[in-house]
Protein backbone atom coordinates (compact mmCIF):
# COMPACT_ATOMS: atom_id res chain seq x y z
CA UNK A 1 0.00 0.00 0.00
CA UNK A 2 1.42 3.38 -1.01
CA UNK A 3 1.49 6.41 1.25
CA UNK A 4 -1.13 8.11 -0.92
CA UNK A 5 -3.56 5.39 0.13
CA UNK A 6 -3.37 6.82 3.64
CA UNK A 7 -3.89 10.40 2.53
CA UNK A 8 -6.52 9.83 -0.17
CA UNK A 9 -8.66 6.88 1.01
CA UNK A 10 -10.51 5.75 -2.11
CA UNK A 11 -12.34 2.97 -0.25
CA UNK A 12 -13.75 5.19 2.48
CA UNK A 13 -17.27 3.72 2.21
CA UNK A 14 -15.89 0.24 2.96
CA UNK A 15 -14.12 1.47 6.09
CA UNK A 16 -17.00 0.10 8.12
CA UNK A 17 -18.31 -2.82 10.13
CA UNK A 18 -20.20 -5.34 8.04
CA UNK A 19 -23.37 -5.02 10.09
CA UNK A 20 -23.83 -1.43 8.94
CA UNK A 21 -24.34 -2.78 5.42
CA UNK A 22 -26.54 -5.70 6.46
CA UNK A 23 -28.74 -3.31 8.45
CA UNK A 24 -28.86 -0.91 5.50
CA UNK A 25 -30.07 -3.75 3.29
CA UNK A 26 -32.62 -4.64 5.94
CA UNK A 27 -33.95 -1.06 6.10
CA UNK A 28 -34.10 -0.95 2.31
CA UNK A 29 -36.07 -4.21 2.13
CA UNK A 30 -38.32 -3.66 5.17
CA UNK A 31 -40.14 -0.56 4.02
CA UNK A 32 -37.90 1.85 5.91
CA UNK A 33 -35.89 3.02 2.92
CA UNK A 34 -37.36 6.50 3.28
CA UNK A 35 -37.35 6.62 7.09
CA UNK A 36 -35.43 9.41 8.79
CA UNK A 37 -33.21 8.95 11.83
CA UNK A 38 -31.36 11.09 14.33
CA UNK A 39 -28.24 9.65 15.96
CA UNK A 40 -25.93 11.09 18.61
CA UNK A 41 -22.24 10.47 19.27
CA UNK A 42 -21.31 10.70 22.94
CA UNK A 43 -19.06 9.08 25.55
CA UNK A 44 -20.05 7.95 29.03
CA UNK A 45 -16.92 8.74 31.06
CA UNK A 46 -14.14 11.27 30.83
CA UNK A 47 -10.88 9.68 29.64
CA UNK A 48 -7.89 9.21 31.96
CA UNK A 49 -10.14 9.67 35.02
CA UNK A 50 -10.03 13.37 34.21
CA UNK A 51 -12.63 16.10 34.24
CA UNK A 52 -13.03 16.83 30.52
CA UNK A 53 -12.29 15.79 26.94
CA UNK A 54 -11.21 17.76 23.85
CA UNK A 55 -13.36 17.22 20.76
CA UNK A 56 -11.22 16.32 17.75
CA UNK A 57 -11.81 14.70 14.38
CA UNK A 58 -15.10 16.56 13.98
CA UNK A 59 -13.50 18.94 11.49
CA UNK A 60 -12.94 16.04 9.09
CA UNK A 61 -16.58 14.92 9.11
CA UNK A 62 -17.59 17.01 6.04
CA UNK A 63 -14.82 15.37 3.99
CA UNK A 64 -15.98 11.95 5.19
CA UNK A 65 -19.58 12.59 4.17
CA UNK A 66 -18.79 14.13 0.79
CA UNK A 67 -16.42 11.29 -0.18
CA UNK A 68 -18.57 8.43 1.11
CA UNK A 69 -19.40 6.84 -2.25
CA UNK A 70 -19.59 3.21 -3.38
CA UNK A 71 -17.63 3.03 -6.60
CA UNK A 72 -17.65 0.15 -9.08
CA UNK A 73 -14.81 -1.69 -7.32
CA UNK A 74 -16.60 -1.48 -3.97
CA UNK A 75 -19.85 -2.77 -5.43
CA UNK A 76 -18.04 -5.63 -7.15
CA UNK A 77 -16.43 -6.65 -3.87
CA UNK A 78 -19.73 -6.57 -1.99
CA UNK A 79 -21.40 -8.59 -4.73
CA UNK A 80 -18.96 -11.46 -4.14
CA UNK A 81 -19.48 -11.76 -0.38
CA UNK A 82 -21.05 -15.04 0.68
CA UNK A 83 -23.70 -15.41 3.38
CA UNK A 84 -22.84 -17.91 6.16
CA UNK A 85 -25.95 -19.93 5.29
CA UNK A 86 -25.15 -20.06 1.58
CA UNK A 87 -25.67 -17.74 -1.36
CA UNK A 88 -24.72 -14.13 -1.76
CA UNK A 89 -24.85 -11.84 1.26
CA UNK A 90 -26.24 -8.84 -0.63
CA UNK A 91 -29.07 -8.71 -3.12
CA UNK A 92 -28.28 -7.31 -6.58
CA UNK A 93 -31.12 -4.80 -6.28
CA UNK A 94 -29.71 -3.41 -3.05
CA UNK A 95 -26.23 -3.11 -4.54
CA UNK A 96 -27.75 -1.31 -7.49
CA UNK A 97 -29.28 1.11 -4.97
CA UNK A 98 -25.88 1.63 -3.33
CA UNK A 99 -23.98 2.13 -6.59
CA UNK A 100 -23.03 5.78 -6.78
CA UNK A 101 -25.26 6.52 -3.77
CA UNK A 102 -24.43 9.76 -1.94
CA UNK A 103 -25.20 10.34 1.70
CA UNK A 104 -28.00 12.84 2.32
CA UNK A 105 -27.37 13.44 6.01
CA UNK A 106 -27.02 16.69 7.93
CA UNK A 107 -24.48 16.87 10.75
CA UNK A 108 -24.01 19.11 13.77
CA UNK A 109 -20.80 18.82 15.77
CA UNK A 110 -18.79 20.40 18.57
CA UNK A 111 -16.04 22.41 16.84
CA UNK A 112 -12.59 20.88 17.09
CA UNK A 113 -10.75 21.98 20.19
CA UNK A 114 -13.98 22.37 22.19
CA UNK A 115 -14.08 21.12 25.75
CA UNK A 116 -16.76 18.40 25.95
CA UNK A 117 -18.19 16.23 28.69
CA UNK A 118 -19.83 12.82 29.25
CA UNK A 119 -23.35 12.02 28.06
CA UNK A 120 -23.83 15.12 25.94
CA UNK A 121 -23.86 14.74 22.14
CA UNK A 122 -20.63 15.89 20.53
CA UNK A 123 -21.96 14.96 17.06
CA UNK A 124 -25.57 14.75 15.86
CA UNK A 125 -26.35 13.03 12.54
CA UNK A 126 -29.80 13.42 11.01
CA UNK A 127 -31.21 12.22 7.70
CA UNK A 128 -32.20 9.04 5.84
CA UNK A 129 -31.80 6.22 8.35
CA UNK A 130 -29.90 4.08 5.86
CA UNK A 131 -27.35 6.85 5.37
CA UNK A 132 -27.08 7.49 9.10
CA UNK A 133 -26.37 3.81 9.67
CA UNK A 134 -23.86 3.48 6.86
CA UNK A 135 -21.66 6.28 8.20
CA UNK A 136 -21.63 5.17 11.86
CA UNK A 137 -18.40 3.18 12.01
CA UNK A 138 -16.31 5.51 9.88
CA UNK A 139 -17.48 8.52 11.88
CA UNK A 140 -16.71 6.90 15.23
CA UNK A 141 -13.33 5.79 13.89
CA UNK A 142 -12.61 9.41 13.01
CA UNK A 143 -13.76 11.05 16.25
CA UNK A 144 -13.04 8.52 19.02
CA UNK A 145 -9.28 8.20 18.66
CA UNK A 146 -8.53 11.83 17.82
CA UNK A 147 -10.62 13.05 20.76
CA UNK A 148 -8.67 10.70 23.02
CA UNK A 149 -5.29 11.88 21.67
CA UNK A 150 -6.21 15.57 21.87
CA UNK A 151 -7.31 15.09 25.48
CA UNK A 152 -4.13 13.24 26.42
CA UNK A 153 -2.04 15.94 24.78
CA UNK A 154 -3.92 18.73 26.56
CA UNK A 155 -3.10 17.05 29.87
CA UNK A 156 0.58 16.70 28.95
CA UNK A 157 0.71 20.33 27.81
CA UNK A 158 -0.93 21.41 31.07
CA UNK A 159 1.74 19.55 33.03
CA UNK A 160 4.48 21.14 30.89
CA UNK A 161 3.45 24.60 32.17
CA UNK A 162 4.02 26.46 28.92
CA UNK A 163 7.15 24.60 27.84
CA UNK A 164 6.97 23.17 24.29
CA UNK A 165 5.82 19.57 23.84
CA UNK A 166 6.64 17.69 20.64
CA UNK A 167 4.86 14.57 19.40
CA UNK A 168 7.49 11.83 19.10
CA UNK A 169 5.00 8.96 18.82
CA UNK A 170 5.09 7.88 15.16
CA UNK A 171 7.27 4.79 15.62
CA UNK A 172 4.97 3.52 18.41
CA UNK A 173 1.65 4.52 16.83
CA UNK A 174 -0.90 2.06 15.49
CA UNK A 175 0.23 2.08 11.88
CA UNK A 176 0.80 4.93 9.40
CA UNK A 177 -2.78 6.21 9.58
CA UNK A 178 -2.65 6.10 13.37
CA UNK A 179 0.55 8.11 13.30
CA UNK A 180 -1.10 10.78 11.17
CA UNK A 181 -4.12 10.93 13.47
CA UNK A 182 -1.84 11.29 16.51
CA UNK A 183 0.10 14.15 14.92
CA UNK A 184 -3.07 15.96 13.88
CA UNK A 185 -4.92 15.55 17.17
CA UNK A 186 -1.90 16.27 19.35
CA UNK A 187 -1.41 19.58 17.54
CA UNK A 188 -5.03 20.52 18.26
CA UNK A 189 -4.44 19.51 21.88
CA UNK A 190 -1.49 21.89 22.20
CA UNK A 191 1.66 20.09 21.01
CA UNK A 192 4.06 22.53 19.39
CA UNK A 193 5.41 20.17 16.72
CA UNK A 194 5.66 16.58 15.50
CA UNK A 195 8.45 14.30 14.36
CA UNK A 196 6.10 12.99 11.62
CA UNK A 197 7.22 14.55 8.34
CA UNK A 198 4.20 13.28 6.39
CA UNK A 199 1.88 14.90 8.91
CA UNK A 200 3.81 18.12 8.47
CA UNK A 201 3.27 17.94 4.71
CA UNK A 202 -0.44 17.09 4.90
CA UNK A 203 -1.55 19.24 7.82
CA UNK A 204 1.03 22.03 7.92
CA UNK A 205 2.17 21.08 11.42
CA UNK A 206 5.69 22.23 12.40
CA UNK A 207 8.13 19.31 12.28
CA UNK A 208 11.05 18.75 14.62
CA UNK A 209 13.96 16.31 14.87
CA UNK A 210 17.74 16.13 15.10
CA UNK A 211 19.71 12.89 15.56
CA UNK A 212 19.55 9.51 17.30
CA UNK A 213 22.02 7.42 19.29
CA UNK A 214 23.04 5.69 16.07
CA UNK A 215 24.59 8.95 14.85
CA UNK A 216 26.89 9.09 17.87
CA UNK A 217 27.73 5.38 17.65
CA UNK A 218 28.69 5.74 13.98
CA UNK A 219 31.72 7.88 14.82
CA UNK A 220 34.95 6.88 16.61
CA UNK A 221 34.07 9.14 19.54
CA UNK A 222 31.17 11.16 20.89
CA UNK A 223 32.96 14.48 20.48
CA UNK A 224 33.61 13.72 16.80
CA UNK A 225 29.95 12.85 16.31
CA UNK A 226 28.87 16.12 17.95
CA UNK A 227 31.32 18.16 15.86
CA UNK A 228 30.13 16.49 12.66
CA UNK A 229 26.48 17.16 13.48
CA UNK A 230 27.20 20.78 14.37
CA UNK A 231 28.94 21.15 11.00
CA UNK A 232 26.08 19.64 9.01
CA UNK A 233 23.19 21.20 10.99
CA UNK A 234 24.40 24.45 12.56
CA UNK A 235 20.90 25.96 12.50
CA UNK A 236 19.23 22.89 13.99
CA UNK A 237 21.83 21.59 16.42
CA UNK A 238 20.38 19.62 19.32
CA UNK A 239 22.85 17.08 20.68
CA UNK A 240 21.72 13.81 22.27
CA UNK A 241 24.01 13.43 25.26
CA UNK A 242 23.05 10.09 26.83
CA UNK A 243 24.50 7.54 24.39
CA UNK A 244 27.30 6.69 26.82
CA UNK A 245 27.56 8.88 29.93
CA UNK A 246 25.41 11.98 30.32
CA UNK A 247 27.88 14.01 32.36
CA UNK A 248 30.65 13.38 29.83
CA UNK A 249 28.17 14.02 27.03
CA UNK A 250 27.37 17.41 28.54
CA UNK A 251 31.09 18.28 28.68
CA UNK A 252 31.47 17.30 25.02
CA UNK A 253 28.42 19.37 24.12
CA UNK A 254 29.92 22.36 25.95
CA UNK A 255 33.14 22.03 23.92
CA UNK A 256 31.15 21.93 20.68
CA UNK A 257 28.97 24.82 21.83
CA UNK A 258 32.04 27.00 22.46
CA UNK A 259 33.49 26.03 19.07
CA UNK A 260 30.20 26.98 17.41
CA UNK A 261 30.23 30.36 19.17
CA UNK A 262 33.70 31.02 17.75
CA UNK A 263 32.23 30.44 14.26
CA UNK A 264 29.34 32.79 14.94
CA UNK A 265 26.89 29.91 15.45
CA UNK A 266 24.93 28.66 18.44
CA UNK A 267 24.22 25.28 19.95
CA UNK A 268 20.41 25.16 20.27
CA UNK A 269 19.91 22.51 22.92
CA UNK A 270 20.82 19.12 24.29
CA UNK A 271 18.43 16.21 24.72
CA UNK A 272 18.49 13.67 27.56
CA UNK A 273 16.67 10.43 26.78
CA UNK A 274 17.47 8.21 29.78
CA UNK A 275 18.41 8.17 33.43
CA UNK A 276 17.29 10.41 36.28
CA UNK A 277 16.02 13.33 34.23
CA UNK A 278 15.64 15.65 37.21
CA UNK A 279 19.19 15.14 38.49
CA UNK A 280 20.81 15.09 35.08
CA UNK A 281 19.02 18.20 33.82
CA UNK A 282 20.12 20.10 36.96
CA UNK A 283 23.72 19.01 36.34
CA UNK A 284 23.52 20.03 32.68
CA UNK A 285 22.01 23.44 33.45
CA UNK A 286 24.71 24.22 36.01
CA UNK A 287 27.47 23.10 33.64
CA UNK A 288 26.23 25.15 30.67
CA UNK A 289 25.66 28.22 32.82
CA UNK A 290 29.16 27.95 34.28
CA UNK A 291 30.56 27.74 30.74
CA UNK A 292 28.74 30.91 29.67
CA UNK A 293 26.25 28.99 27.51
CA UNK A 294 23.14 30.03 29.38
CA UNK A 295 21.15 30.11 26.13
CA UNK A 296 21.51 26.36 25.47
CA UNK A 297 18.18 24.68 26.19
CA UNK A 298 17.57 21.28 27.79
CA UNK A 299 15.08 18.91 26.21
CA UNK A 300 13.91 15.64 27.77
CA UNK A 301 12.29 12.50 26.42
CA UNK A 302 12.00 8.84 27.60
CA UNK A 303 8.45 7.51 28.15
CA UNK A 304 7.10 10.79 29.47
CA UNK A 305 3.49 11.57 30.31
CA UNK A 306 1.64 14.24 32.29
CA UNK A 307 2.50 12.63 35.62
CA UNK A 308 6.24 12.28 35.02
CA UNK A 309 6.45 15.84 33.69
CA UNK A 310 4.55 17.12 36.71
CA UNK A 311 6.93 15.19 38.96
CA UNK A 312 10.00 16.58 37.18
CA UNK A 313 8.90 20.16 37.77
CA UNK A 314 8.02 19.35 41.38
CA UNK A 315 11.68 18.30 41.75
CA UNK A 316 12.85 21.58 40.23
CA UNK A 317 14.09 20.09 36.96
CA UNK A 318 15.25 22.96 34.65
CA UNK A 319 13.84 21.34 31.50
CA UNK A 320 12.86 23.63 28.63
CA UNK A 321 10.98 21.25 26.31
CA UNK A 322 9.68 17.71 26.08
CA UNK A 323 9.47 15.00 23.43
CA UNK A 324 6.53 12.75 24.30
CA UNK A 325 6.16 9.56 22.29
CA UNK A 326 4.81 6.18 23.36
CA UNK A 327 2.43 7.28 26.09
CA UNK A 328 1.00 10.00 23.88
CA UNK A 329 0.58 7.94 20.71
CA UNK A 330 -0.92 4.98 22.58
CA UNK A 331 -2.88 7.19 25.02
CA UNK A 332 -1.52 5.24 27.94
CA UNK A 333 -3.17 4.06 30.19
CA UNK A 334 -6.51 4.28 28.31
CA UNK A 335 -6.41 2.91 24.74
CA UNK A 336 -9.92 3.97 23.67
CA UNK A 337 -12.48 6.67 24.38
CA UNK A 338 -15.55 4.43 24.25
CA UNK A 339 -17.63 6.87 22.24
CA UNK A 340 -20.93 5.44 20.99
CA UNK A 341 -23.48 6.25 18.28
CA UNK A 342 -27.10 5.84 19.35
CA UNK A 343 -30.47 6.39 17.73
CA UNK A 344 -32.42 9.10 19.59
CA UNK A 345 -35.36 9.83 17.25
CA UNK A 346 -36.99 8.29 14.18
CA UNK A 347 -39.48 9.39 11.55
CA UNK A 348 -40.73 6.22 9.90
CA UNK A 349 -42.84 7.76 7.11
CA UNK A 350 -42.84 10.97 5.12
CA UNK A 351 -45.98 12.23 6.85
CA UNK A 352 -45.19 10.87 10.30
CA UNK A 353 -44.03 12.94 13.25
CA UNK A 354 -40.61 12.46 14.79
CA UNK A 355 -40.74 9.87 17.57
CA UNK A 356 -38.21 10.06 20.41
CA UNK A 357 -36.65 6.70 21.25
CA UNK A 358 -34.16 5.48 23.83
CA UNK A 359 -32.18 2.42 24.73
CA UNK A 360 -33.51 1.29 28.12
CA UNK A 361 -30.98 -1.48 28.90
CA UNK A 362 -30.79 -3.63 32.00
CA UNK A 363 -27.87 -1.44 33.05
CA UNK A 364 -29.03 2.03 34.10
CA UNK A 365 -25.59 3.31 33.17
CA UNK A 366 -26.23 2.49 29.49
CA UNK A 367 -29.62 4.18 29.14
CA UNK A 368 -29.61 6.84 26.45
CA UNK A 369 -31.32 10.21 26.15
CA UNK A 370 -34.29 10.49 23.76
CA UNK A 371 -35.04 13.21 21.23
CA UNK A 372 -33.33 15.50 18.74
CA UNK A 373 -30.85 17.09 21.11
CA UNK A 374 -28.96 20.35 21.39
CA UNK A 375 -26.35 21.32 23.96
CA UNK A 376 -26.62 24.74 25.57
CA UNK A 377 -23.48 25.91 27.32
CA UNK A 378 -23.74 28.63 29.96
CA UNK A 379 -21.03 31.24 30.54
CA UNK A 380 -20.37 33.75 33.29
CA UNK A 381 -19.25 37.36 32.76
CA UNK A 382 -15.60 36.23 32.52
CA UNK A 383 -16.49 33.88 29.63
CA UNK A 384 -15.93 30.81 31.82
CA UNK A 385 -18.22 27.81 31.14
CA UNK A 386 -20.45 27.11 34.16
CA UNK A 387 -22.42 24.11 32.92
CA UNK A 388 -24.15 22.43 29.98
CA UNK A 389 -27.82 21.68 29.44
CA UNK A 390 -29.15 19.09 27.01
CA UNK A 391 -32.41 20.26 25.41
CA UNK A 392 -34.60 18.91 22.61
CA UNK A 393 -35.83 20.54 19.42
CA UNK A 394 -39.04 22.07 20.73
CA UNK A 395 -37.39 23.81 23.70
CA UNK A 396 -36.40 27.45 23.25
CA UNK A 397 -32.96 28.45 24.52
CA UNK A 398 -34.14 31.60 26.23
CA UNK A 399 -36.74 29.80 28.37
CA UNK A 400 -34.50 27.10 29.84
CA UNK A 401 -32.21 27.89 32.73
CA UNK A 402 -32.71 24.96 35.08
CA UNK A 403 -31.60 21.38 34.62
CA UNK A 404 -31.51 17.97 36.28
CA UNK A 405 -28.15 16.21 36.44
CA UNK A 406 -27.74 13.76 33.57
CA UNK A 407 -26.96 10.92 35.99
CA UNK A 408 -28.25 11.92 39.45
CA UNK A 409 -31.93 13.06 39.39
CA UNK A 410 -31.58 14.55 42.87
CA UNK A 411 -28.97 17.07 41.71
CA UNK A 412 -30.38 20.24 40.12
CA UNK A 413 -28.67 23.16 38.40
CA UNK A 414 -29.78 26.77 38.07
CA UNK A 415 -28.19 28.54 35.10
CA UNK A 416 -30.52 31.55 35.19
CA UNK A 417 -27.76 34.13 35.69
CA UNK A 418 -25.56 33.00 32.80
CA UNK A 419 -25.31 33.64 29.07
CA UNK A 420 -26.51 30.76 26.85
CA UNK A 421 -24.74 29.60 23.67
CA UNK A 422 -25.34 26.50 21.60
CA UNK A 423 -22.37 24.11 21.43
CA UNK A 424 -23.14 22.09 18.29
CA UNK A 425 -22.57 23.77 14.93
CA UNK A 426 -23.97 22.51 11.63
CA UNK A 427 -21.10 21.34 9.43
CA UNK A 428 -22.98 19.26 6.83
CA UNK A 429 -26.33 19.99 5.16
CA UNK A 430 -27.98 17.30 3.02
CA UNK A 431 -24.66 15.60 2.34
CA UNK A 432 -22.53 18.65 1.59
CA UNK A 433 -20.20 20.80 3.67
CA UNK A 434 -21.81 23.85 5.19
CA UNK A 435 -19.51 26.81 5.62
CA UNK A 436 -15.79 27.16 5.16
CA UNK A 437 -13.49 24.59 6.77
CA UNK A 438 -11.58 25.67 9.86
CA UNK A 439 -7.82 25.38 10.03
CA UNK A 440 -5.97 23.32 12.62
CA UNK A 441 -4.68 26.61 13.97
CA UNK A 442 -8.28 27.67 14.67
CA UNK A 443 -8.92 24.42 16.53
CA UNK A 444 -5.66 24.72 18.44
CA UNK A 445 -6.47 28.28 19.54
CA UNK A 446 -9.97 27.22 20.61
CA UNK A 447 -8.56 24.39 22.73
CA UNK A 448 -6.10 26.71 24.46
CA UNK A 449 -8.75 29.37 25.08
CA UNK A 450 -11.40 26.98 26.40
CA UNK A 451 -8.97 25.26 28.76
CA UNK A 452 -7.74 28.63 30.00
CA UNK A 453 -11.33 29.54 30.97
CA UNK A 454 -12.23 26.14 32.44
CA UNK A 455 -12.38 25.85 36.23
CA UNK A 456 -8.97 24.63 37.50
CA UNK A 457 -10.79 22.18 39.77
CA UNK A 458 -12.16 20.45 36.65
CA UNK A 459 -8.68 20.32 35.06
CA UNK A 460 -6.75 18.87 37.99
CA UNK A 461 -5.40 15.35 37.51
CA UNK A 462 -6.33 13.91 40.90
CA UNK A 463 -10.04 13.71 41.78
CA UNK A 464 -11.21 16.46 39.43
CA UNK A 465 -14.43 18.33 40.14
CA UNK A 466 -17.35 17.15 38.01
CA UNK A 467 -18.49 19.72 35.45
CA UNK A 468 -22.29 20.23 35.54
CA UNK A 469 -24.14 18.52 32.67
CA UNK A 470 -27.90 18.39 33.01
CA UNK A 471 -31.11 17.61 31.18
CA UNK A 472 -33.74 20.27 30.63
CA UNK A 473 -36.38 19.54 33.30
CA UNK A 474 -39.11 18.58 30.82
CA UNK A 475 -36.69 16.26 28.99
CA UNK A 476 -35.74 14.64 32.30
CA UNK A 477 -39.41 14.00 33.09
CA UNK A 478 -40.06 12.66 29.58
CA UNK A 479 -37.13 10.27 29.80
CA UNK A 480 -38.38 8.93 33.14
CA UNK A 481 -41.89 8.48 31.71
CA UNK A 482 -40.51 6.65 28.68
CA UNK A 483 -38.50 4.31 30.91
CA UNK A 484 -41.54 3.51 33.05
CA UNK A 485 -43.67 2.91 29.96
CA UNK A 486 -41.13 0.59 28.34
CA UNK A 487 -40.69 -1.33 31.62
CA UNK A 488 -44.48 -1.64 32.03
CA UNK A 489 -44.57 0.36 35.24
CA UNK A 490 -47.38 2.72 34.17
Image (cartoon, rainbow, N blue to C red):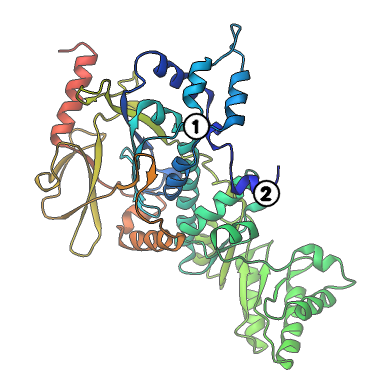
Tell me, yes or no, if residue 19 can be seen here.
Answer: no
Give coordinates of residue 128: x percent, y percent.
35, 29
The residue shown at (49%, 64%) is 160
Q: From the image, which quarter does the N terminus lie in?
A: top right
Give coordinates of residue 289: x percent, y percent.
62, 85
Q: Are marks 2 and 1 in contact (CB under 8 Å)?
A: no
Relative to 109, does residue 358 appear above or below in the rendering? above
Q: Tell me how many marks there are.
A: 2
The residue shown at (46%, 48%) is 60
Q: From the image, which quarter does the C terminus lie in?
A: top left
Give the Cα distance between marks 2 and 1: 26 Å
Q: Is residue 310 left or right of residue 406?
A: right
Q: Secondary structure at mark 2?
A: loop
Residue that numbered label 1 is attached to: 100
Q: Residues within 10 Å of mark 1 (few under 14, many from 20)?
A: some
Mark toward the viewer: 2 or 1:
1
Amino acid sequence: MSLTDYTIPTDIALNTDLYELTMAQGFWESGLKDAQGCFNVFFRDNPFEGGYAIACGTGQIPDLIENFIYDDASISYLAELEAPGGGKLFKPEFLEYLAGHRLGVSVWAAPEGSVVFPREPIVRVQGPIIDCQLVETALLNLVNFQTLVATKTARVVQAAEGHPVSDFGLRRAQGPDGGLAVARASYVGGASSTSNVLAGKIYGIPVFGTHAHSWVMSFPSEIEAFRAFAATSPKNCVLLVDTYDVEQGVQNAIKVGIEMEERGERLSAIRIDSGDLARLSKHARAAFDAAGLEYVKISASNDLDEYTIQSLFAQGAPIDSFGVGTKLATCDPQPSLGGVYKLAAIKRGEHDEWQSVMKISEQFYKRTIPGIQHVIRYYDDADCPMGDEIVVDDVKMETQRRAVDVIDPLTKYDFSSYEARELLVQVVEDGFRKGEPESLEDARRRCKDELMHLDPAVKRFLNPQSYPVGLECGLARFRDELVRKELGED
